[in-house]
Image (cartoon, rainbow, N blue to C red):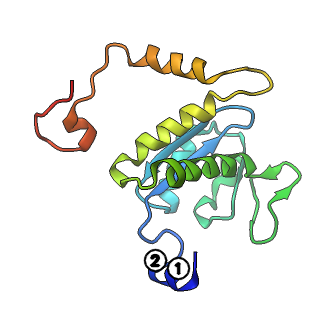
């Protein structure tokens, strides 16, 4: 992006005017994400406690909101200002997920309304958790079959889709 365009479009740093998303990835396992209200300690630590068993090894970046988790977890921190990997201490798997999500949003969907963000997250989580690995040879056809089997008998109304309260439905 050219500097003059950057100055017009990027008016702040960090989370200004951004929807906050929390994510957790079990090494060798599945990823979970959710839209959260803010980046405050109470909010993020509640998410960690909901999705991570006490006593587990926990690796995070240096966000101060994670301070204090060492009381319940074997919490190790990697400060990305210094380095990205220190032996087993890294967040590369979660960073990979965020990279795939961002590429999907900016490349395929172009623009996402905050109201619908959780749906895009759910789609990317499904893709990530059902990707081909050394252990499983999941194909696009297999993923499509999984989706079709899960939508049988479900109905999405227009009101639910758009967040409106009108009775209009989509058949």
Q: Secondary structure at mark 1?
A: helix
Please determine whether, in this image, residue 159 is positioned above or below residue 142: below
Look at the numbered discs 1 and 2 and tell me whether their residues touch, using CB distance below 8 Å. Answer: yes
Q: Which residue is identified by label 2?
A: 9
Q: Residue at x 48, y 21 (%)?
A: 147
Viewer can see residue 95:
yes
Structural crowding at the residue carrying mark 1, measured as other residues with C-alpha within 10 Å and reported as few (<14), some (14–19) or many (≥20): few
Along the viewing direction, whichever of 148 and 39 lies nearer the viewer: 148
* 164 with respect to 69 (left or right): left
Task: Please state the total of marks drawn on the protein image.
Answer: 2
- Spot occupied by residue 29 in the image (x, y as percentages of width and height): 69, 31
Residue 159 on image: x %, y %: 19, 37
Residue at image location 49% in from the left, 63% down from the top: 40
Q: Quadrant of residue 77?
A: bottom right
Is residue 45 something that shows in the picture?
Answer: no
In the rendered structure, find residue 163 and report the number of the disc placed on it.
none
Task: Name the one closer to the observer, 121 or 21.
Answer: 121
Q: Residue furthest right?
A: 87
Q: Residue 110 location, x and y as percent?
A: 46, 54
What residue appears at the point 36 percent right and 46 percent down from the top-left corner? 116
User: Which quadrant is home to the C terminus?
Assistant: top left
Residue shown at 36% from the left, 54% from the top: 113
Place residue 38 in its image quadrant: bottom left
Residue pointed to by mark 1 = 6
CA neighbours of label 2 inside 10 A, class few (<14), some (14 to 19), many (20+): few
Q: CA distance from mark 1 to mark 2?
A: 5 Å
Helix or strand or loop: what does disc 2 sit on? helix
């Amino acid at each position: 992006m050219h500097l003059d365009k950057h100055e017009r479009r990027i008016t702040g740093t960090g989370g200004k005017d951004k929807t906050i998303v929390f994510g957790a990835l079990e090494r060798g396992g599945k990823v979970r994400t959710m839209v959260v209200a803010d980046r405050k300690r109470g909010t993020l630590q509640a998410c960690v406690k909901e999705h991570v068993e006490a006593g587990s090894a926990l690796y995070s970046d240096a966000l101060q909101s994670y301070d204090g988790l060492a009381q319940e977890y074997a919490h190790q921190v990697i400060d990305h200002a210094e380095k990205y990997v220190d032996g087993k201490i890294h967040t590369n798997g979660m960073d990979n997920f965020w990279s795939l999500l961002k590429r999907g949003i900016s490349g395929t969907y172009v623009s996402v309304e905050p109201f619908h963000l959780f749906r895009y997250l759910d789609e990317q989580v499904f893709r990530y958790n059902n990707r081909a690995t050394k252990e499983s040879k999941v194909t696009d056809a297999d993923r499509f079959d999984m989706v079709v089997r899960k939508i049988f008998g479900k109905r999405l109304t227009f009101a639910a889709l758009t967040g409106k309260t009108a009775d209009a439905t989509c058949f």
